[in-house]
Image (cartoon, coloured by chain):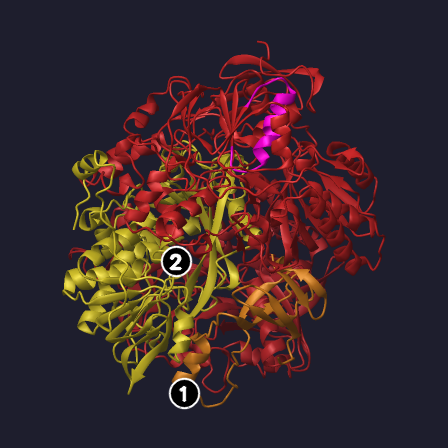
Chain colours: A orange, B yellow, C red
Amino acid sequence: MLHIKCPHCGLRSQNEFSYGGDATIKRPELNKEISDKDWDNFVYLRKSPRGKHLELWQHISGCRQWIKVERDTLTHEILKTLKANEEI
Amino acid sequence: MQKYSILNLVKEAFNKHEGWEVAWKDPNPKKEYDVIIIGGGGHGLATAYYLAKEHKITNVAIIEKGWIGGGNVGRNTTIIRSNYMHDENGLFYEKSMKLWRSMSQDLNFNVMFSPRGIINLAHSDAQMNSYSRRGNSMRLNGIDALLLNREELKKIVPMLDFSENVRFPIFGGLMQPSGGTARHDAVAWGYARQADSMGVDIIQHCEVTGFDIVNGKIKGVKTSKGEIKSKKVGLCVAGNTSVLAEMLNMTLPIETHLLQACVSEPIKPILNHVVTFGAGHFYCSQSDKGEMVMGGDLDGYNSYAQRGNLPTLQHVLTEGIAMFPFLSKLKMLRTWGGIMDMSMDGSPIIDKTHIEGLYLNCGWCYGGFKATPASGWTFAHTIAQDRPHELNTGYSLNRFSTGRLIDEKGLGTKTWIS
Amino acid sequence: MPQNFRLDKGGLINRNKKISFKFNGKIYFGYEGDTLASALIANGIHLVGRSFKYHRPRGFFGAGVDDPYAMVQLIRDSESIPNVRATEQELFEGLEAKSVNCWPNVNFDIGAINNFLNKFFPAGFYYKTFMWPRSFWYKVYEPIIRKAAGFGVVSTNHDQERYEHKYEYCDLLVTGSGPSGLASAYAAAKNGAKVILAEDKPRFGGSLLTSEVSIGNQSGQEWTENIITELKSMLNVTIKNRSQVFGYYDHNMLVMSERISDHLAKTNKYIPKQRLWYIRAKEVLISSGSIERPLIFGNNDTPGVMLSSAAKEYLKLYGVLVGKKPIVFTNNDSGYETAIEFKKNGIHPIVLDSRKNPNSEIINEAKNQNIDVKFSYVVVAAKGYKKVKSADIAKISEDKKKLGKIENIICDCICVSGFWTPTIHLASQSGNKTKFNENIDAFVPGQSKQNETVLGSAKGIFTLEETLRTSFEKGNELSKKITNKENIIPIPSVVEKKHSIHDKFWCVPLPDSKNYKRFLDFQNDVTVSDVELALREGYRSIEHVKRYTTLGMATDQGKTSNLNGLQLVSDVENKLVPQVGHTTFRPPYTSVSIGSIVGREIGKNSKPTRRSPMHSWHEKNNAVFVDAGIWLRPRYYKQGNEDLFEASKREAKNVRQNVGVCDVTTLGKIDIKGPDSAEFLNRVYTNAWLKLPIGKARYGVMLREDGIVMDDGTTTRISENHYHMTTTTAQAANVLSHLEYYLQLVWPELNVNVVSTTEQWAGAAIAGPKSRQVLQKLFPGLDVSKEGLPFMGYLEGNLFGVNAKIYRISFSGELAYEVNVESDNGNYMWEKIMEIGKEFNIQPYGTEALSTLRIEMGHVAGSELDGRTIPYDNSLEGLVSKKKDFIGKRSLSKISYVASDRQKVVGVVPLDKKTSIPEGSYIVKDPKVNLPIPKLGHISASCWSVEYDNPFSLAIIKDGKNMIGKKLFALSPLKNKIIPVEIVSSHYVDPKGERVRS
């Protein structure tokens, strides 16, 4: 079970969190022209790197905040955790 | 090629088994091939076999970074079925079933295909209805399916929990009598041996480090054993697809996730079917060795680790005991993990790419093993003819732009929710 | 029966407590403190079972978890337990055990015919045969093989035992209580660290219990006892015996299985049988020791051949002789310890040492004690079938390739020592890349990956002095880092015998013209020739060898066989062992009971159950419940002999004619507050939300970004900046996370807060033409007239003293209201509604009637919004704003989504107006064409229309818009039905929607 440091609550076990996938994907702005291709890329394409992965978790059984976690997908080592509004 | 048979086995018994030939050779790569298949797993080996057998293309290399059969073909729970709702899946997997039925004879290698029947349990009328939708679709596609009620199930699988003390009582189930299991390693080895005998070079411990692409056309691959030329290259590296895609500057509708499985210590035969739990994610069968083979949920976060954590197995086994209370008394002997390509609609991709001569076979989620023969068969066709076969037309890459998605579970792009 | 092989004294058993037990039907005696294995050996029993493939006789090879043979069926407290290792099972009064994998019995086993045919069954033989005729594998061969395989038998009755879980945090977890574990735990404990010390065996001390050493003038045993006593007295220390740390997982999470009652005749009622510990440790000290390696020779699987360390353990812990004419066959000094121990107890062993001319303190001692020591000698083959009767021995050449003249000597056991293999499993599981140490011919841990530190012989340190010194140091160093305290303990002086180097030799060559089986994996019957065959056939990777031969895949997971297998591969392939590499070490280190992994979440408690505040009323009123996710909802309220169909029809009809009340507490409820709430809703829902007046509700649909409908529900504007959202029961949690995602990550500039209020409110839907009359009486002071509370209106009221919120919304298509009160008042509200509604013939209705009502109105629900449909498919296009942007809008322009023949929800009526169409049927044009039959779409929901008294269904079919009026077929091959149908509008009842607005 992973041990994730919630930037709001501190170190907690993984079972308090739920996973939210790739955190590097930016939702296109509302009401802005966007090509089909760019939109589909946003909805469907994922880099899924082997190694460092910036991803979202929600502290669902805690503060309910979405947080960003930099984790190594090969070793599961967590390198950094950030608040939703922080950039790596 | 030396034939495997009871006669030869007896003959060799009196020869201290000294006369058995190598199942496949260990060649060094040639400078150039007609086709290079990257990935010596089940799908890659099957593709090479069908390229040789069906399309007479034998100047083929399989490049494998580790040892053949070391990925998901050797890490799955060996279940074979075609109980799909969507036509694209149903027809594709039924082709696979046909190939499974004659595989041992075709490959002259006993893959122990055991059509013992697979049963999906239902725990509500609503679930019975959704299984009806699936089962009826199967029947209309020519696939065998039966809807079983609680009483019928009691007779077939009496050790299910039919007691009062259950959280989700069993209402019935959907059964595909022709579904079953096979010996996973044997599939890889059987394909390898035949492909090798027809001239395919199986090159192990050879890692792809880059691609040679000129003017949008593939010219060859760079490997740890040097550059190898080919005008056609097929990718069959489920679990690592995104890593190779990155080398190709491609981003795919795929995430890599971890799935664990485990076996109990071997016991005398008790379970004669493959059974899946309907109120969660758990499936179970008993291997010929006597081990209960069990699996369930993803660990639920991107991972290439091939190692998982216990809470996921705890969760899976909780559902296991809810289904088969006697499992509580057994001991968990061995656990392992495999990494899978989870595609954004839960269905695979077998297609050409925007790079001429580069073909893609990926996105198998946790269903790749049963697809092995049909995947190889259609991928070989796609490579040889440079166009998909009608069985894999639906598995196109562009379905994500057209919206012709094949989402059996209706869960969308959150691939980690199973 | 007398215990002929029990010494008169010695051992750590309690000789004052004699215990009787049964093995294969016969009664024997042992002592408290025995294992089943030690007690059987004391009684001269060595034959315990039969091997997996050849059914060869199997005895005891080890004295603990490493034993590959000794599996029995145990009967304990009337439960028959398969695959119990006799070397681990402690003896209790009345214990009963049976041999497995043999028929009719272990002495005469029909299956042993396999042994005589073994030349036909080399590794992988089954891949080469059993293929003809095609159907025979499944029908004939496989059933025979399955029957022959497997070990114990499990009954299908439920497990009556209780298992518990415990979550623990500590500074240092020490895995193993041998010298390194004790020293490091003690040093850490003295520094004030929170320490957990885990020992797999019943007794603490590990190798200290059996080795002839002294630590600061105490024997190993005494020193252990003193340290343990002191540790037990310290509040910062938890020490656990019978506790195996079996897995090292991510982020220093380790899992330990504590066997609390397995050694007792019966589990105490209030105590679990086993407890699973999830331990998050800051530092992990792996002191798991090492396991002796076998030497390989002909018929080395014969009962009576065992590890020399095991023989010593039986002697020193249990006072049991494994034989009275022992041969000790060794390639290192360890074997001499066993020999000397025999000698001390009046037994005259012969030592065969494969080394040419070794010299060390212990060898000299053995010689001084007149032990017969032969150098450059090996055991060529064990003789005897069910028990060793003699041994063929021979001198071996210096290059270890040639054997001298074979001599036969009488013996009754052969104790083998092929040097030591560090137990590196936990370190390797942590991610530690192991490295090969040529000095000890084994893998040792490399660089730490997580916070693991490996100590003592697990690290390849085989002298007590170094083990103690480094372990004290590590324990001190690591704990000091955490506690900032240092309490240096003087390291005690050690007296031990110095050992000379071992011989790399491990496998005795076959003598000319002999084809003895030389076993590597004793349980799975994998021999040297099997591995050679695999390599010859091209299965050259160690993983291929393992899988092809099944080497190391038995229940002992290759603890004694893996390294010899590697050696063999390296010899044949002419590669160095590290180049061959080892297979992956995965948890669990030893098998763990599935019951203990699962714990208390079994039976009814396998998942939580959620109940509404009105649940007990429903129960009292004959509700039949249905699972809706983890909620329990009334499906119908049974009257008399009604079945589901009759009851739901009655309830639905009563709603259409009078008034009904339905518990809608389970719907998800989300409070939305903040000045930007309207803007937020406008982005979340597909329709427009900016102009919703205060006190008004609106129906909304929300999409995923891929354009698929995610959920639907109504949201009400309670005040300027306060909205109340409802979601479906199933999607409640997902919708909340979805909203939080957009607020926190995508549009943090929006000033909005959301919180779930599902548990705060109890809800009742009052529906039917007479619902307004009921409402009027419920809220006498409130204007609930058509004008006062119009369709989609909202009011707050006082329901006989409790605050209530009244929403005029309808799922049934009738005039309807939903009343919410605080959960605690739910039952009160419900009873009031029933009491007041009585004069209007109010009846409660369940989910089945609810379904009927919504289906015949053409309202879509979960079976249509199935994660695959877009708004258009569900006739919800009217709710999709063309003017504004919202989540998922951009996806709706996909080619297939705008195709003219896109699927759409329609109504379906059987032509005979009688035959119900099973849900999950398919609509086709022509049922008679060949398979596969093209499908137009499927039946998503079916009901018996109470309005028209005939069956009615909803379907989602291709080009649905243009299909209305067409006559087609509904097919359900599963139910053998072909039903001619007509496609009609999905709005079957009140298509203009007049009733809801009445």
> Where does the image place residue A1, in percent across and percent down from the top left?
60, 56
Within 10 Å of disc 1 (Cα), the crowding (few <14, some 14-19, many 20+) is: few
Within 10 Å of disc 2 (Cα), the crowding (few <14, some 14-19, many 20+) is: many
**Which disc, if any, is residue B71?**
2
Task: Reply above or below: C763 against C894.
Answer: above
Q: Which segment did they paint magenta?
A: C330-349
Question: Does residue C104 appear in the picture of this structure?
Answer: yes
**Which amino acid type is marked by label 1?**
Ser
The answer to the question of whether label 1 and label 2 lie on touching residues, with beta carbons closer than 8 A, is no
> Where does the image place residue C93, in percent across and percent down from the top left?
64, 18
Please give the residue where the numbered disc 1 appears in the rendered image.
Answer: A35
Task: Reply above or below: C84 against A21.
Answer: above
**Which amino acid type is marked by label 2?**
Gly
> Where does the image place residue B53, in percent across and percent down from the top left?
16, 60
Gap in angstroms between the C-alphas marked 1 and 2: 38 Å
Where the N terminus of chain C falls, by quadrant? top right
Question: Does residue C91 appear in the picture of this structure?
Answer: no
Task: Reply above or below: C16 against C152.
Answer: above
**Chain at tag 2:** B
Query: Depth check: B370 or C428 in front?
Result: C428
Q: Left or right: where does residue C795 sit relative to residue B330?
A: right
Does the magenta portion include C345? yes
Residue projecting furthest to the bottom: A33
